[in-house]
Amino acid sequence: MAKNEAPLGSVDDFLKQCQQSGDAAYAALRSVLERLEDPKTRTQARIFLTDLQNRFPSKEACDQCFRTYHFQIEDIFFDQYEGYQGRKKLTMMVIPSIFVPEDWSFTFFEGLNRHSDSIFKDKSVAELGCGNGWISIAIAEKWLPLKVYGLEINPRAVKMSWINLYLNALDERGQPIYDVEKKTLLDRVEFHESDLLSYCRDNDIQLERIVGCIPQILNPNPDAMSKMITENASEEFLHSLSNYCALQGFLEDQFGLGLIARAVEEGIAVIKPMGIMIFNMGGRPGQAVCKRLFERRGFHVNKLWQTKILQAADTDISALVEIENNSPHRFEFFMGLSGDQPICARTAWAYGNAGGRISHALSVYSCQLRQPNQVKTIFEFLENGFHEISSSLDLSFEDDAVADEKIPFLANLSSVLKGSSFGTYEPPAGSKHFRSLIAGFMRTYHRIPLKADNVVVFPSRAVAIENALRLFSPRLAIVDEHLTRHLPREWLTSLAIECAGTDKPSEDVITVIQAPRQSDLMIELIRKLKPQVVVTGIADYEAVTSSAFVHLLDVTREIGSRLFLDISDHFELSSLPGSNGVLKYIGGTALPSHAAIICGLVKNKVYSDLEVAFVISEEEAIFKALSKTVELLEGNTAPISQFYYGCLFHELLAFQLADRHPPAQRESALPKSAEMIGFASSAISVLNNAELSISEAENSSLIHMDVDQSFLRVPSPVKAAIFESFSRQNIAESEIDVTTSIKQFIKSTYGYPVDSSTEFIYADSSLALFNKMVLCCIQEGGTLCFPAGANGNYVSAAKFLKANIVTIPTNPTDGFKLTDKVLSGALGTVNKPWVYISGPTINPTGLIYSNKEIESLLSACAKVGARVVIDTSFSGLEYDIEGWGGWNLVDSLSRLNTSNTCFCVSLLGGLSLKMLSGALKFGFLVLNQAVLVDTFDSFPGLSKPHNTVKYAVKKLLSLREQKPGGLWDAIAEHIKTLKSQSKRLKETLEKCGWDVVEPCGGVSMVAKPTSYLNKSVKVDDSNIREVIHKATELCINSGAWTGIPGYCRFTIAHEDSEFERALDCIVKFKDTINN
């Protein structure tokens, strides 16, 4: 006979075994369960339980049974709840190692009853912390769900739940009890040992309802969970286990709500999109805290039911008193059940110790995700190694419009950070995807047949306007008075307008006349002053129709003026955009070649100061030229800003059917004036000769070794900082004040001296700050001195800005580094020198200036009163530094004896390379001379870093100071990769006949194609870039860019597969030349 087929024996024998101990009683009950699980003995076992219950017919007898035999069976009555079958009671068994049903669970069930009868009907349901299973069984009995999963971490409770299920699925004679759908409770309910929702997650079970009556932890014990959770553990431990008395690693731990917080976050992963979670919440932390636990995770919250219960007399609340003593938070108790004024934990503790009874609120909350798929994506990202930043997440919004904008963005950001995280090349004109979205929005909502190549993206509207004016260099421009605030002061104070009618205007002076926005007054000024360029907006009352715009087009065409029309104030990112006369016009008529549209995107609901601008032009030459000004003067527009607005455009386009409307048929634009101003001759010369990044064809896959960008993987600490910066709400000013961190950074890294008069200036890129310094040099009548072997983009930008430039020779024997001897000789012949030094790591050679070398260079500059700009933007990734020792500029400068007040050292830097933060654009400039600060301030058109960027940068700089750590480890890994790739690139180049200058750090190196110079195929600085590009799709810079005749520049910060492709291209080029 099988073990579970043996007779159970008499009730007396059973009770005798149970009387020995709680463990003995549990063993006896397990034996009963084994027989219940076997269909052959199930009926007999259920009849045995009937006989057992009949031994204890009264409440007093049941209580005595619990004390004597370590179990009890009693009925829970539902006279007031009419279920589908009208069952009046459930029969339940409990043992000492699990919770006995009490006020908490009864209140919870009352809250469940507040929902409509359809709440659980035909739904998949999980109950967390099901205890002895009575609520799971009651749900199945009353609402007929598809399946109820009762989940419990206490293994003994799971066994007792199964016994209780059989007790109620079978009648007293052991026969199945069928409901109206001909199913039994055994068909609807199952119980599993599970740490919260781990069972459902492990078995890929998706739920429609999650309910939980989960306790709060008043005195967290971090060691409690370290014990083995087994059904053979002590009764005391198993009972305390139901409290989960361990810290959960959540912000809400401090209020005893950490376990509920974890349950909610686990529930997000397994709840279906329209699913509902229902939780019992003790009100001790305060109703606002309880509600916020759900709201900040993206839930709509509804309080179903609230009552008060007495605080258990044996519960120690001194831990809550301690929290109140160390924080501004106040817990919420009441004096007795009738008190209606809350008292704090300290008062409640004192009242309770004096013999008073204290109570607290008990509430049942029903909550539903407001944007379930997006919130799931966000939490999936956080669970994938970013749990430490989940406390910063806040998805609670008073305004639904804000939620509708921010939650999808955070979901998209999560997806991108989880993957490549902004590690790809984007053209200076702006992300191709972003420009396509802008064009798509214009086609879909305004019927304007634009393409991505009609759109150029800028960091801001002010930058777009200034770049356009510099591109054309008009002698006279009329600019809307609302748009002149960020233009250079000298443009707004110049009166050089007397030569308005001459054929040869000077390109060196731009005079800007401010004009009112009202179109008739603007047009009068245009007719009288005949400007070469007009930049204006349109008054609100004139924007609805196109007549004012058409009038402006006609007048500027007649006069021969370029027109840049700003529509920022009237452009709506909405699925129902208002009437816009300008867009209505160009939906029916092609935009004339002399006109372009400027639009600054600032009208978002969440980040009001986050700006991106774009310019629309249907003239290819304008598109290309403006794109090049972005690369020269800004580098590119911050990827994260483009990404944010790209998400908004995507949300407005994603639900639309593609190509539902036929292409718009538009009238041709009027012919342009024959006397229209063209690009400034100096601008044309620079743009044509500058080796800017090569634009990719539609289906090409170029390898960009010609851009100052790292394509290496963005490390987790940077991803965390980026996400946290956007997920936070109500960021304090102190959290975005990066100056203290930057001070510490430049002090510890370069020993740069700072005092109370030191000025710190921030921008989206160090290149933009450098260009403002070039303008300061020009303003002072200075001469900008570049060493041969400087960054070609910086040199081209200075030429574009019309700086007076001198190149200081460098020698191959010195590794093309600047020497004090050569520098001294050159500066002796230069008027008002401004010296640019890239260091400690020199871009593009990758060599390093030692502390002694930089001190000697500064000494040479001090003797002639030169202004020095030290550019550290490409430093911080040194890998061959034996004997280097770093810089100490404080000591170096203190040893210089100079009475020349013109001498000063400004420090330029950026953190994108140092902090490996490809998506974050952040540059800084440190000035130590008041006169220079005043001059710099006269050029206000900087695109400043957004607060989210400053928050992330401050966070990363803080991590950097906490060495060693995650960020340091990531930087070390990147440096190791750069060293390896520089070595492999050097070996490959040398095998292919190149002479290489071996770098010591940074992301680039230079080499000369010596063996190719005397081949039948002529290869030199004038064509090597184009030849390699066409032969291999590898993009590099030639000697024309590096300033070192014959030496090309290669950047090395590429991910593995791309780097391998680049090496193959170099070999392929060798084979092509040889053949």
Image (cartoon, grey):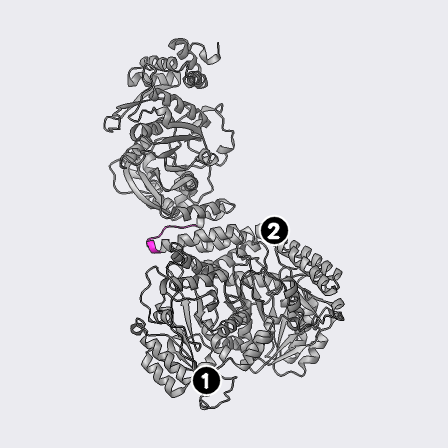
Residue 407 seen from this side: yes
Q: Secondary structure at mark 1?
A: loop
Q: Position of residue 332 (x, y in %)?
A: 32, 42
In the rendered view, tell whether residue 1064 sits above or below residue 280: below
Q: Which residue corresponds to the image point at 44% horizontal and 67% vertical from the top-left?
A: 613
Question: In percent of the image, x 45 and y 26: which residue is there?
Answer: 155
Q: Is 396 on the left-hand or right-hand side of 796?
A: left
Amino acid of disc 2 = Asp
Mark 1 Cα-neighbour bin, 10 Å: few <14, some 14–19, many ≥20 = few
Q: In the image shown, does 374 or 917 lie closer to the viewer?
A: 374
Q: CA distance from mark 1 to mark 2?
A: 62 Å
Q: Nearer the viewer, mark 1 or mark 2?
A: 1
Q: Which residues are magenta?
A: 393-401
Q: Per the image, is 396 magenta?
A: yes
Image position, residue 682 (x, y; %): 56, 81
- Residue wearing tag 2: 969
Q: Secondary structure at mark 2?
A: helix
Residue 511 location in percent, x, y? 45, 83
Q: Amino acid at mark 1?
A: Ala
Nearest the camera: 254 or 1031? 1031
Is residue 157 placed above or below 41 in the rendered structure? below
- The answer to whether residue 905 is visible is no
Determine contact: label 1, label 2, CB under 8 Å. no
Q: Quadrant of residue 364?
A: top left
Q: Quadrant where the C terminus lies? A: bottom right
- Closest to the observer, 626 or 382: 626
Q: Main secondary structure of the magenta part?
A: loop
Q: Which mark is residue 874?
A: none
Residue name at image x 45 percent, y 10 percent: 6
Q: Which residue is mark 1?
A: 674
Image quarter for residue 887? bottom right
Q: Position of residue 656 (x, y in %)?
A: 38, 56
